[in-house]
C-alpha cells in the first residue's frame, strides 16, 4: 500500500487565529464576542421569542474591552458570530518614555516596547505613572490582547 510515515502529523497548532466562530445562542453572559470587528465583553443577554420568521433573537448588551464604550447588538440565536481569543499577561515596567510608551519585561526576561499607557479609564495612566514613581517602585501591569490590539488594563505595586 503506502508508507506509514507519509501521513505523520508533527504539529497540531491552531495557527494564528484571532477569533473563533460560535453560534450567537451559545455566547454567555460574562463572555466575549466581536461586534463590528471590536472585541466586547457581554454584560447582559435577553432572548426574544421565535417570531413569524422562525428565529429567536439574542439582544446583547456589551462593553468594548479596550475603550469601555457600551455597544448593543441583536443577532438571531442560530446565526453565527465570532468570539475573540483574549489573553492577559503580566509584565514588569522597566521604563516609561516621554511619549507614554512602556518598556516592559516578563518573568522570562522577554522585552516589549510597543505598548502605550492606557487611555481608558481616564485616570489609569496617571495612577500607573504615580505608582511607578520614576522607577522607585516595582510595578506589574496586566496587558490584555485581542484581535491584534494590546492595552494595559490593570496594575499592581510589587515592591515600594
Image: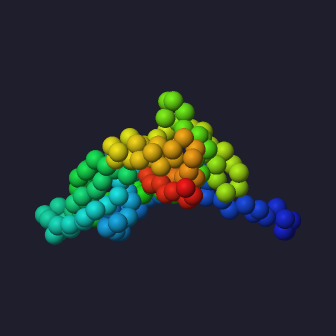
- Residue at 31% x, 49% y: name it: 68
Residue 44 place in picture, x, y as percent: 25, 64
- Residue at 84% x, 65% y: name it: 5
Find residue 140 and report its image quarter. bottom right
- Residue at 21% x, 67% y: name it: 47
Residue 11 place in picture, x, y as percent: 73, 60
User: With 127 as the anchor, is 57 left or right in this view?
Assistant: left
The quarter of the image holding the N terminus is bottom right
Please name whichever residue, 31 or 156, is drawn nearer the observer in this view of the structure: 156
**Could one spot residue 110 in this view of the protein?**
yes
The quarter of the image holding the C terminus is bottom right
* Position of 105 relative to 24 (above/below): above
- Residue at 17% x, 61% y: name it: 53
What coloring was used for the rendering?
Answer: rainbow
Q: Residue furthest top?
A: 98
**Could one spot residue 150 in this view of the protein?**
no
User: With 13 as the anchor, is 33 left or right in this view?
Assistant: left
* Position of 60 relative to 93 (above/below): below
User: With 14 as the anchor, is 10 left or right in this view?
Assistant: right
Please name whichever residue, 142 or 36, is drawn nearer the observer in this view of the structure: 142
Amino acid at each position: 500500500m503506502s508508507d506509514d510515515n507519509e501521513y505523520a502529523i508533527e504539529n497540531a497548532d491552531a495557527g494564528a487565529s484571532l477569533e473563533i466562530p460560535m453560534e450567537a445562542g451559545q455566547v454567555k453572559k460574562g463572555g466575549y464576542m466581536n461586534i463590528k470587528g471590536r472585541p466586547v465583553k457581554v454584560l447582559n443577554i435577553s432572548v426574544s421569542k421565535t417570531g413569524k420568521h422562525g428565529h429567536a433573537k439574542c439582544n446583547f448588551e456589551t462593553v468594548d474591552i479596550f475603550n469601555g464604550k457600551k455597544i448593543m447588538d441583536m443577532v438571531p440565536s442560530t446565526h453565527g458570530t465570532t468570539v475573540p481569543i483574549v489573553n492577559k499577561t503580566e509584565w514588569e515596567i522597566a521604563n516609561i518614555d516621554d511619549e507614554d510608551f512602556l518598556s516592559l519585561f516578563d518573568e522570562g526576561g522577554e522585552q516589549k516596547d510597543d505598548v502605550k499607557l492606557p487611555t481608558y479609564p481616564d485616570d489609569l495612566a496617571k495612577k500607573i505613572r504615580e505608582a511607578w514613581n520614576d522607577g522607585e517602585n516595582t510595578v506589574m501591569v496586566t496587558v490584555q490582547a485581542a484581535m491584534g490590539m494590546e492595552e494595559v488594563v490593570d496594575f499592581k505595586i510589587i515592591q515600594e
